[in-house]
Each structure stands twice: as structure tokens, then as C-alpha cells.
Amino acid sequence: MKRNLFYLLPLLLTLGVACSPKNEVVPVAQPQGNFTGTFGALVKKASGSGYDTVRDTIALKLTAASLFKVAADTRKHVASYGGFVYNGYYIQFNDSSAVVPGVNKFHLKGVYQYYYDGNVFQLQRNSNGDTLTVQYNLKKAN
């Protein structure tokens, strides 16, 4: 009896593996389209202690070719363009626009955590130094 069970065990293991659920890889939807919304940052005050909140409105275009463009220069954010890469958790922007010395405005560059559901596109980057956090809350423009 034990001998028959010994020969049956590999068959049962093979059957168990074949019937187990498969881990299917679900593709991550690429963020693309025209987005508008707010940009915000928490920045250390120049004098004294504490932080100031910086806010502005921006327009962002993401293409299927993994290119981005911040449409217009605003009071706190510069117009920029370049490429981006993404996965299910992070998106990285590589700014190709020229950096003007002495202009203290924010650029869309670096690695951000993001959320995208096909309509809402949110980005956040935490930092150390003078800027604690940078956030973008954008919605797809029609």
C-alpha cells in the first residue's frame, strides 16, 4: 500500500500545480492625453522657521510616445518638455528644456509616485531639504 502511494504522490503534485491559479500580468495603462489642474509644494521659508505653501495651475500633455510637455510658464512653474518612463507605481520625468540660472521655479523632473485611473492623474514626490513635498492633482481635459 505504501509503495503504491509513493508512485501516486508525483502524479498528485503535478495535478496540483497544473490546477493552481495562474499569476497573470495585467498591463499598466500608460498615462496619456491632455491634463489640467493644480500644482502644489511645501517649501521651507526663506526667513525664520516654518513652511510656505506654493500653488499654481498647470497644463500637461503626455503622448503615447512617452513624451511630456508642460504647456505654459506660470508664476511658480516653468514650461518644460522631455520624456518619461513609468511602471505601476512610479513615473520618472526627464526634463530636456534648458535650465535658466537664477530662475527659482519648479520643473516637472525626477521620480514621482503616481495614481492614474484614465481620468484622474496625481503625482507626489517627497524630498528633504528646502522642499518637503511636491504634488500635482490633474484631470484629463476633454
Image (cartoon, rainbow, N blue to C red):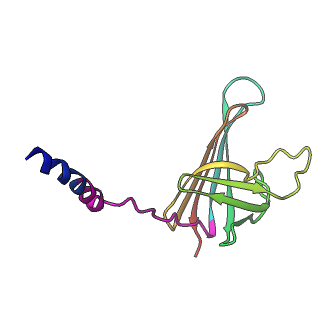
Q: Image quadrant of residue 83?
A: bottom right
Residue most toward the left?
Answer: 1
Residue nearest the observer in this picture, 109 or 54: 109
> With 64 as the anchor, is 118 left or right in this view?
left
Q: Going 71% across and 55% down the picture, which residue do you hit? A: 93
Residue 126 at x, y percent in the picture: 62, 39
Residue nearest the observer in this picture, 124 or 56: 124
Residue nearest the observer in this picture, 65 or 62: 65
Q: Going 57% across and 57% down the picture, which residue do you hit? A: 87
Q: Which residues are magenta?
A: 13-35
Name the image quarter holding the C terminus. Answer: bottom right
Residue 65 at x, y percent in the picture: 69, 71
Instruction: Please tell me whether residue 83 is drawn above or below residue 54 in the rendered image.
Output: below
> With 22 as the anchor, is 9 left or right in this view?
left
Residue most toward the top?
Answer: 48
Q: Image quadrant of residue 69?
A: bottom right
Instruction: Please tell me whether residue 83 is drawn above or below residue 126 in the rendered image.
Output: below
Residue 85 at x, y percent in the picture: 66, 59
> With 8 as the anchor, is 125 left or right in this view?
right
Q: Going 39% across and 59% down the picture, which residue do you hit? A: 23
- Whether the magenta-drawn stretch holds residue 28 is answered as yes
Residue most toward the bottom?
Answer: 142
Instruction: Please tell me whether residue 7 is drawn above or below residue 141 in the rendered image.
Output: above
Residue 122 at x, y percent in the picture: 56, 55
